Amino acid sequence: MQPETNRQPLSLYLHIPFCRHRCGYCDFNTYAGLEDLMPAYTDALIAEAEWLAAAAGERLPVHTIFLGGGTPSLLPLEAMQRLLGALHAAYDVAADAEISLEANPGTLSPEYLAGLRAAGFNRISLGVQSASPHELLVLEREHDFVDVVNSVKWARQAGFDNLNLDWIFGLPGQSLASWQRNLELAVGLAPEHLSLYALSIEHGTPFKELDGRGLLALPDGDAAAEMYELADRMLADGGFVQYEISNWAKPGADGQPRACRHNLQYWRNLPYAGLGAGAHGFLAGHRTANVLAPAAYIKRMRDAGAATAAASGLPRTPATASAEPVDARREMGETMMMGLRLVREGVSQAGFAQRFGSTLEQVYGRSITALQRRGLLETASGALRLTHQGRLLGNQVFMEFV
Ligand code: SF4
């Protein structure tokens, strides 16, 4: 079973649900035109962080903090300083904690980046998505590639030595040649980390409707697989190491890829608190989800005061909409599905047995054997992991562990 939260370092995810414009493909919990709520929302986030810390009854150790969205880089510097100050006051944030911010190129300036660095952020994740003006237009993104080049330059000048760039492939009308050009430019920017995601068409988005009317001209599955294979080759040539299905990193001083430590917490199925509107968490053996609407979130935290936090216990806060207990079987399945995404590390046989008191063989022997026969799983260095073919057919593997 999941070890108790207070015996291992925690990760904190803070959701910032504001965007200047809603992109046609996006199904995240984010809103355009609610910027007026930012000051009250920042207060509510701080109140929720403090509530959780008080509910724990002890100072929780924290080793990663991630501000995601939405567009966190729309928050003013003063709000960032207050947020990080409150987290440091309420938690034992490790001296070497990874503190990341998602940012949109076009929302950044040299002064803002210098201010973020001074406030304590040490990793920036830029939502680039594409370098092609046409593809950015299709995605309804508001920046251009010059904004990206400037953002990287300014981040370096501000002292950030850990940069991620997010890219999307399989875009409407995208050719393999265009994707190759995108990859050349991505490598040319010399980030420490690259995340490459296949475009997925989500329910309730304008893209879903366009796709339903046959208007998106999406590359077919074979073309998307070819794009993925091309990335695999080009990024390896560029000095990147793939460590997760969609993530590559350059080796750091210790020779290991500079993985996103915050996301490793998810993939290793370890505890994290999700703070903010619509944020999800995995805390004290529960999967939690907060109320979605920013105004409702603010109201809940405002109405709660601080009176009963200490008595409420983990994992609930006044913003919690649901908190489902996770039984051992579900936790094992989630550990497999997320751990197998780590293409080098995989799921440790010894680690699994220690965590759950049963071996992989005892719990999943039949499925593992079948997947090994199909060439999708392999055992290496005491861990079960996807083969090269398994990476392309990951969903078929994960289904076996649901
Ligand atoms: S900027 Fe990002 S979070 Fe905001 S709407 Fe576009 S894709 Fe979604």
Image (tube, rainbow, N blue to C red):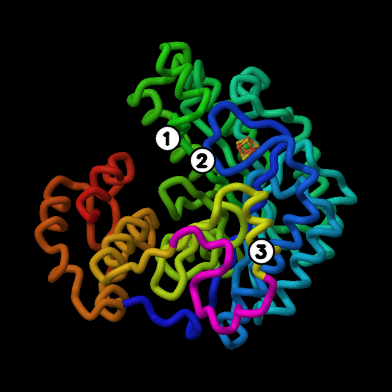
Task: Name which residue lies at 40% across and 68% down.
Answer: 286
* Residue 308 within the segment the image draws in magenta: yes
Number of labels in the image equals 3
Q: Amino acid at mark 1?
A: Tyr
Q: Determine crowd level at label 2: few under 14, some 14-19, many 20+ residues with C-alpha closer than 10 A.
A: some
Q: Quarter containing ligand 1? A: top right
Q: Which residue is denoted by mark 3 in the rendering?
A: 301
C-alpha gap between disc 1 and disc 3: 43 Å
C-alpha gap between disc 2 and disc 3: 36 Å
Q: Which residue is denoted by mark 2 in the rendering?
A: 196
Task: Name which residue lies at 11% across and 52% down.
Answer: 370
Q: Which residue is denoted by mark 1 in the rendering?
A: 228
Vertical relation: 142 (above or below) 193: above
Q: Amino acid at mark 3?
A: Met
Q: Are marks 1 and 2 in contact (CB under 8 Å)?
A: yes
Extent of the magenta region: 305-322
